[in-house]
Image: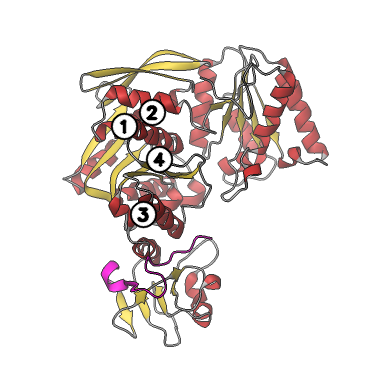
């Protein structure tokens, strides 16, 4: 586990809480100097300051005595708690305090870079990686923190970390700053916003892809979800820029930005003529698509392998970020094309077969509906969904293995669908897994060029080893395709992306 420690180490000067937590009240002291902090009493060590947060594990206020017994030299809490004489700092929100403190202990690395935060109900990962590709095309040193992993400007393979945790986010930002990044792109989930993980980070640009009904299981109501998402405006720098969908769904967010941050600017992207950056489809099929981008008198064509319309929306968001930094539209188009596609985001699995097969790791019903709707419009024949049970359960808010609600939901677009248990990759797989594989075999054997297959799988867990990088169901389907179709010349290794 990456620890949040001061940039001077435990023996250094540390951070004074009075300087970073406005409105804090101190009990039993005038101030507290912090050289290390924890929000888990079990991980507290001598000299740490314990932050009493309400987490998925427990209420940290009930763990203060344990933290003190383990050597905590200070406590940050939202209410009065017994501390056995250890100095106490009272704050309004311990979530905010913990995130702000981890950034301060890391040396506030975000201040040395231009931070671009990307949020929304869907399209965050794709927009983040396309944004990084656009900025890299301009020769900028870019780091990316996203669901697909974390990577610096000279990295080749993203590292899977739980960067949504404030202390890990701070450590990674410090690493990117140390590697000379000028820009850092951060995918920001509603869970991160609920935990106020961006406290202490002034974002130079914020991109909001969309705000739809999603993750109600985490935030209670659609209104609560929208309120959490709009919290990201609190992280926009006074003279920052908001990039948003301009087709009407985010009008209120744009108006609120203009009211709260009069020095900030905004850019809109979409398909309507009123958008600052617009797109018009030229050609679209399951083989890919070509579209025209237009802004400020500039027009540039873009050709990509990913066929769905939602990819264009995400590409426009990335392009708008490029415009924010003064890049010409032609260079932006090259950056989008250089990305080709985004791994695990409607990524083509190509083993020479006639039927188009795509891999997706959608994390919300809104994202999956967008993908299936796009593929349905482009598929003249049968659309088949092969879904890992874990992925289906995540989309349905943790449903059990039956998945009837999930199958009923996707039946709106799919001609056939199969829920696949995780045991399908076990050497001694059970009868349910064997039956699922038999269905997959029959379906794939009967499909042709007019049909389409979407494989819905989950990303490997953060910290997964190299052998766990390919999702289980995707590896099964790819293996079937290799056995059933002779590889094309020069095709070596894993699933090939379409050119």
Badge 1 or badge 4: first in the primary sequence: 4
Badge 3 or badge 2: first in the primary sequence: 3
Which residue is found at the position 68% from the left and 15% from the top?
447
Residue 138 has which mark? Answer: 1
Look at the image and say whether residue 309 sits in the magenta stretch: no
Look at the image and say whether residue 7 sits in the magenta stretch: yes
Q: Secondary structure at mark 3?
A: loop
Q: Position of residue 276 (x, y in %)?
A: 24, 27
Are the residues at dot 1 and dot 2 in contact (C-beta closer than 8 Å)?
no
Q: Residues within 10 Å of mark 4 (few under 14, many from 20)?
A: many
Segment colored magenta: 1-23
Q: Is residue 435 left or right of residue 156?
A: right
Which residue does the numbered mark 3 point to in the structure image?
Answer: 198
How far is the residue under mark 1 from the one under mark 2?
A: 16 Å
Which residue does the numbered mark 2 point to in the structure image?
Answer: 315
Q: Is residue 220 visible?
A: no
Q: Secondary structure at mark 2?
A: helix
Q: Is residue 343 left or right of residue 315?
A: right
- The image quarter in which residue 118 lies: top left
**Comparing labels 4 and 3, the label whose residue is closer to the camera:** 3
Q: Nearer the viewer, residue 376 or 187?
A: 187
Which residue does the numbered mark 4 point to in the structure image?
Answer: 120
How far is the residue under mark 1 from the one under mark 4?
A: 26 Å
């Amino acid at each position: 586990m990456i620890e949040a420690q001061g940039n001077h180490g435990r023996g250094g000067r540390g951070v004074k809480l009075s300087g970073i937590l406005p409105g804090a009240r101190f009990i039993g002291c005038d101030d507290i100097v912090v050289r290390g902090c924890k929000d888990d009493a079990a991980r507290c060590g001598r000299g740490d300051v314990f932050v009493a947060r309400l987490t998925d594990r427990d209420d940290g206020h009930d763990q203060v005595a344990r933290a003190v017994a383990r050597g905590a030299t200070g406590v940050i809490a939202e209410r009065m708690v017994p501390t056995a004489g250890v100095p106490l700092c009272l704050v309004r929100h311990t979530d905010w305090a913990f995130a702000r403190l981890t950034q301060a202990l890391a040396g506030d690395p975000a201040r040395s870079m231009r931070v671009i935060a990307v949020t929304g109900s869907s399209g965050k990962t794709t927009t983040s990686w396309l944004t990084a590709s656009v900025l890299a095309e301009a020769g900028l040193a870019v780091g990316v923190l996203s669901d697909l992993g974390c990577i610096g400007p000279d990295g080749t393979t993203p590292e899977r970390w739980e960067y949504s945790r404030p202390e890990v986010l701070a450590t990674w930002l410090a690493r990117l700053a140390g590697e000379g990044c000028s820009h850092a792109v951060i995918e920001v989930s509603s869970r991160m916003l609920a935990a106020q993980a961006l406290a202490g980070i002034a974002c130079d640009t914020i991109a909001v892809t969309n705000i739809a009904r999603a993750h109600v299981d985490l935030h209670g109501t659609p209104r609560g979800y929208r309120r959490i998402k709009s919290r990201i405006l609190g992280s926009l720098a006074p003279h920052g820029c908001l990039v948003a969908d301009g087709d009407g769904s985010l009008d209120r967010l744009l108006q609120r930005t203009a009211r709260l941050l009069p020095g900030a600017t905004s850019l809109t992207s979409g398909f309507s003529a009123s958008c600052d950056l617009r797109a018009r489809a030229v050609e679209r099929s399951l083989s890919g698509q070509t579209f025209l981008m237009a802004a400020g008198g500039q027009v540039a064509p873009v050709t990509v392998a990913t066929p769905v319309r939602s990819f264009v929306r995400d590409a426009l968001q990335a392009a708008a970020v490029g415009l924010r930094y003064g890049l010409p539209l032609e260079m932006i188009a090259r950056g989008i094309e250089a990305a080709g596609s985004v791994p695990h985001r409607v990524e083509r699995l190509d083993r020479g077969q006639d039927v188009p097969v795509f891999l997706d790791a959608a994390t919300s019903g809104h994202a999956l509906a967008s993908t299936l709707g796009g593929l349905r419009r482009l598929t003249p024949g049968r659309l088949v969904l092969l879904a890992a049970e874990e992925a289906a359960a995540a989309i349905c808010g943790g449903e059990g293995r039956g998945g009837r609600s999930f199958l009923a939901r996707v039946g709106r677009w799919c001609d056939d669908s199969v829920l696949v248990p995780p045991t399908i990759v076990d050497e001694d797989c059970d009868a349910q897994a064997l039956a699922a594989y038999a269905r997959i075999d029959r379906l794939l054997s009967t499909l042709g060029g007019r049909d389409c297959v979407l494989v819905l799988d989950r990303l490997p867990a953060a910290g997964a080893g190299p052998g766990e990088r390919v999702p289980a169901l995707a590896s099964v389907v790819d293996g079937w395709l290799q056995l059933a179709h002779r590889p094309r010349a020069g095709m070596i290794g894993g699933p090939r992306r379409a050119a």
